[in-house]
Image: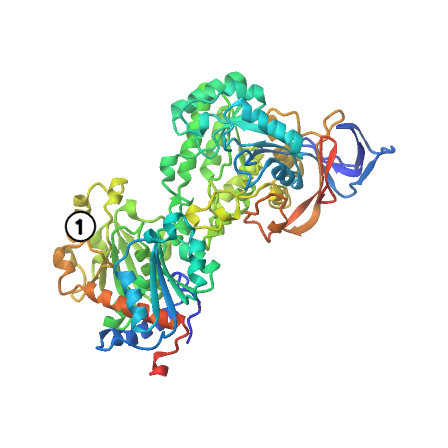
Amino acid sequence: MELKSKHILGIRDMSAEDIIHILNTTKEMKKIVLSDKKRVPYLQGKTVVTLFYENSTRTRLSFELAAKYMGANAANISASGSSVAKGETLIDTGRTIDVMGTDIIVIRHSMSGAPHLLSKNISASVINAGDGMNEHPTQALLDMFTIYEKRGSLEGMRIAIVGDIYHSRVARSNIWGMTKLGAEVCIAGPRTLMPKEIEKTGAKVFDSIQEAIIDADVVMSLRIQLERQKSGLFPSPREYSKFFGLDEKRVKLAKPDVLIMHPGPVNKGLEISSAVAEGDKSVIDEQVTNGVAVRMALLYLLTGGKEIADIN
Amino acid sequence: MRILIKNGIIVNAEQKMETTQDILIDNNKIIKINSTIDEQVELVIDAEGKYVLPGLVDAHCHLREPGYEYKEDIESGTRSAAAGGFTSIACMPNTKPVVDNQAIVKFIIDKARNEGYVNVYPIGAITKGLEGKELAEIGELKFAGAVAISDDGKPVQNASLMKKAMQYASMFDITVISHCEDMDLLDGGTMNEGYQATTMGLRGIPAIAEEVMVSRELLLAEYLNAGVHIAHISTERSVDLIRHAKKRGVKVTCETCPHYFTLTESACEGFNTFAKMNPPLRIQKDVDAILEGIKDGTIDIIATDHAPHHIDEKNVEFELAANGIVGFETAFALSYTYLVKTGVITIEQLVNKMSLKPSKILGLNKGVIQEGRVADITIVDINKKYTVDIEKFKSKSKNSPFGGFELYGTIEYTIVNGKLIVRDGIFM
């Protein structure tokens, strides 16, 4: 089975069938990540370039490792050390990378739609590694994989996402994907950080964290950025933590076997307490491991990879 | 040159003639209108089956000269206007330098006289440099030839300064045009606030960013008993606010643009920067309210907000893309197709909104086909269907979301000051 699209721009336009196909491929890739010999020839001769206009630790490194574990040539460019700093446009930078023989460009950009623009102007495949407030499809795929691997399905799961939904591309991608896979997505956060008409996506909106996480199978806490407070979206970190912070007391409202997730980096003591982030219900570290496997699966599938069983 | 227009149906804002008429133009004037005129002339135009309208008048466009000639200049902009059936246009002052002094007003008037194809009327700035801090020399602007003042694109945020501008301008009887937008409520938005923006991860521009300032201008105008013209309204509540103000007797007029009654925010899907404009495309209930406002007369005129941009300013990230679209060359056909053909208004009412009324708002003596008047005439074929091809635009820029639209109402002839500019749909 081949993916329907040449690019991975978002989960919004991805079919449930493609998502499941990616998750199943990820399962195979995870074996490689956890093995002693992290070297397979699936991407031999292919070139992957990461083009990051924003800072990143997890996403960027996991793409690089994913490419290297599969034998690809991997290179990276960041905005600060390239011609971008000289004012080169996205399209010009993208074309330059494209004509050097690149197969896949992985882009992170502060503006929504930047990967879409790039994809229309170059011949390589484009993977969106986070665009503005729009989507972070590979993060959502690794989040969904984490649940899928543990529970076998997302169908009927109650998943709470808590925090700054407005600015969160992680929330948007997860809402699209999780609802496609049959989960009930409950979101909570200050009203000032809730996007207009978000309920039309199928997500249920709550004003209180308690209501959102009651009986939840999964609770995902989102990073709250302190600069949002300066623009008047919430009064203080202290008040935010009081009303929307995820602590042990609140976790008890969820199902006993709840999975606690966070896309990182974590502000411990603000959106989530240390005890919860590091507690036995937390799968935050596993999310990071799965991130490498998901990105391997995507690079593999985009370069024409067949069902893993076929090549083994 | 003498031109004889034969067998056309003359449509004025007051009435559409029941029988075909001939129009004789000598030099720059209409000298005779009669059911049959037989004279030896240099050029006979067969207008059989076509509508003969007073030349269209646009109260809101951007010609980009001086300063942004790579987008448009007076020559190309007036060519585009003529191709769209416009014979008189008023251009906004957000050029570089800004039209905030009499020298720039005179530069535009002179340049248009020498290179332009249609009548060009500059609009001066309300504040120096469009900075919203100090009043421009409004009296001098008026006497140099500015027909209105506006800080279009960079609206005056300070209510007290706007009050003074309206008060001062009323002394010179010069129209104040307000682009209504509260920049604090805009808050970095790039498209309409709502579900579409939410799904694309773009910051929304709430309708209240427009409406709060519409309210402010209406209250100021009422308080001062001065006039104000509200530019490009796009929301349901703006229509309501103006409708109620008019009932109270507030001296307000307003405009909308074809894109606000033909498109919704969904045109932005796929990060389509050709659908990025300010105010942004709204939702269906707003489109319906705009149509209602056009129908009941709340909305006085249709303006183009012709805003050409270079492709490099549109083929970029949505948030970085310039606002606006090429307006002249689709305005009539869009208005005819979506307003007259659908029965929202009559062709006479459309002529009022696209010719006579804008002329009155700007204090021009235009918009009527009558013996003795200057011969500004547009002949249209309302039965001819065509597909919009943006590559064929006469404007230097091609940024329009209407490519591929099938519309009725082609511009067959444009006559400006008795001179034939467009003939058989072809620019001369």
Determine the residue positioned at 38% across, 27% down: B158
Q: Residues within 10 Å of mark 1 (few under 14, many from 20)?
A: many
Say whether residue A48 is left or right of residue B274: left
Nearer to me, B105 or B376: B105
Nearer to me, A291 or B219: A291
Instruction: Count the marks.
Output: 1
The percent position of residue A146, horizontal first and vertical second, equals 25, 68
Say whether residue B15 is left or right of residue B121: right
Nearer to me, B378 or A214: B378
The percent position of residue B201, horizontal first and vertical second, equals 37, 52
Vertical side of A77 occupied by B299: above or below: above
Q: Is residue A144 visible?
A: no
* Residue denoted by label 1: A270
The percent position of residue B332, horizontal first and vertical second, equals 63, 41
Quadrant into which the N terminus of chain A falls: bottom left
Three-letter residue code for mark 1: Leu
The percent position of residue A67, horizontal first and vertical second, equals 32, 69
Q: Quadrant of residue A9?
A: bottom left
Quadrant into which the C terminus of chain A falls: bottom left
Determine the residue positioned at 29% across, 54% down: A55
Q: In this view, which residue lies farthest toward the top? A: B171
Q: Quadrant of residue A304?
A: bottom left
